[in-house]
Amino acid sequence: MTERPTDCGYLLDTSAVLAFFRGEPEGSVVRDILVGDALVMVSAPTVAEFCRSVAAATERPATEALQAWRRLRPLMSNVLAITEETAEEALRLSGLSTARIPLADALIAACASLHGLRLVHRDRHMRCIRSTALPQVDLASPPPGVM
């Protein structure tokens, strides 16, 4: 495994992207992160989860949800791919968790871990990962200074 940088930016979980997209109160924290100077990334599973969620909520075709994603995409520095190393890190984080984590969430968390990014989420599954294993901003209770 490669050496990881430390806290060089943020990785937005699907729940954070959706909170911003829907204009929910927690989305203001995401907005502040997006307009700041830090790197802001997402992982490939977030793109798929976002589009599926938007399509389901609006009862519109997935192609329209993809268009919504493409309007948001310029706000992110990068979309991180899933690799074999990501899968191994997801397994490691799952082993350190206090409860079972769905595969997509474990892969998203692993992307944050491997790239030294703070995970931004509003997801009860992510709360199961010890903060000592992965720095996090839980939108349900963001720490002071994040906004």
Image: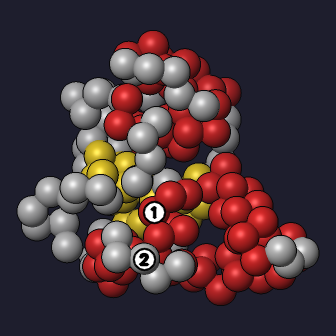
- Residue 26 shows in this picture: yes
- Residue 44 at x, y percent in the picture: 67, 53
Dot 1: element: helix
96 up-or-down from 85: above or below:
above
In this view, the residue in front, 93 or 25, is 25
Spot occupied by residue 92 in the image (x, y as percentages of width and height):
47, 17
Asked if 57 appears above or below 100 in the picture, the reply is below
Asked if disc 2 and disc 1 are in contact, CB closer than 8 Å, the reply is no
Residue at 65 percent of width and 86 percent of height: 71
* Residue occupying image coordinates x 45% and y 63%: 16
Query: Image quadrant of residue 10?
Result: bottom left
Q: Quadrant of the C terminus?
A: bottom left
Q: Is residue 4 visible?
A: no
Q: Is residue 47 left or right of residue 5?
A: right
Q: Residue furthest top?
A: 95
Q: Position of residue 123 (x, y in %)?
A: 44, 47
Q: Secondary structure at mark 2?
A: loop
Q: Residues within 10 Å of mark 1 (few under 14, many from 20)?
A: many
Neighbourhood count class around disc 2 (C-alpha, 10 Å): few under 14, some 14–19, many 20 upward: few
Quickly name the residue at label 1. 16
Q: Residue at x 22, y 55 (%)?
A: 141
Across and down, in percent, residue 91 comes to 55, 19
Amino acid tagged 2: Glu
Disc number for residue 24: 2
Q: Is residue 105 left or right of residue 65?
A: left
Among numbered discs 2 and 1, the one appearing first in the sequence: 1
Q: Amino acid at mark 1?
A: Ala
The numbered mark at residue 42 is none
Residue at 34 percent of width and 70 percent of height: 26
